[in-house]
Image (tube, rainbow, N blue to C red):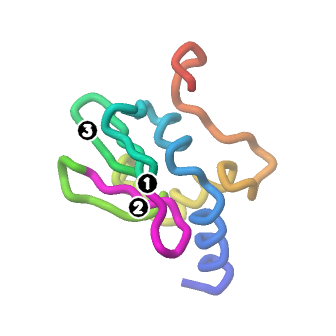
Amino acid sequence: MTKNRDDELENIKQNVNLVEYAQSRGYEISKRDSSKNSTSMKRGGDKIIVATGQDGHGIFFSVNDNSSGSVDDFVQKLDGANLGQVSKELRPWAGLSKQPPVNRLPPEQRP
């Protein structure tokens, strides 16, 4: 990976709110299962736990399939996307694009 791509990915990890992004993909917060240190989220049969890692990045852990990682790994999990596609998806969420973030939910279901 080039230095510019590394910098962009670090910027994305630091600036994208993983809970908000997951909500845009249909995950709902489960207040009953959440705590002050982590947010439990569900979508259909999938359940993830979102927290802040030691490096300050939002991280997720999937209860169902043992996948985990930062927001870029979350997009790869959902879409099977490569890193270039992930960056394109997340640039607006990180404020790195003039385009607004794409909210995949219909307006009546948006948080």
Q: Please state the extent of the stretch shown in magenta in the rendering.
A: 51-62
Q: Nearest to the eye among marks 3 and 1: give it.
A: 1
Q: Residues within 10 Å of mark 1 (few under 14, many from 20)?
A: few
Residue at coordinates 55% horizontally, 69% vertically from top-left? 56
Q: Residues within 10 Å of mark 3 (few under 14, many from 20)?
A: few
Q: Does 69 lie within the magenta span? A: no
Q: Are marks 1 and 2 in contact (CB under 8 Å)?
A: no
Task: Please state the total of marks drawn on the protein image.
Answer: 3
Element assignment for label 3 = strand
Q: Residue furthest front?
A: 36
Element assignment for label 2 = helix
Q: Where does the C terminus fall, quadrant-wise?
A: top right
- Distance from disc 2 to disc 3, alpha carbons, whole Å, reads 16 Å
Mark 2 — residue?
73
Of the two numbered discs 2 and 3 on the same chain, state the one appearing first in sequence.
3
Q: Quadrant of residue 68?
A: bottom left
Q: Which of 81 and 15 is in front in this view?
A: 15
Quick check: 55 left or right of 68?
A: right
Q: What percent of the width, then of the height, locates residue 94?
A: 68, 55
Q: Does 60 lie within the magenta span? A: yes
Vertical relation: 20 (above or below) 65:
above
Q: What percent of the width, then of the height, locates residue 18?
A: 51, 50
Mark 1 — residue?
37
Q: What percent of the width, then of the height, locates residue 91?
A: 66, 56
Residue at coordinates 69% horizontally, 49% vertically from top-left? 92
Q: Where does the N terminus fall, quadrant-wise?
A: bottom right
Vertical relation: 21 (above or below) 27:
below
Q: Quadrant of residue 96?
A: bottom right
Of the two numbered discs 3 and 1 on the same chain, state the one appearing first in sequence.
1
Mark 3 — residue?
46
Q: Nearest to the eye among marks 1 and 2: give it.
A: 1
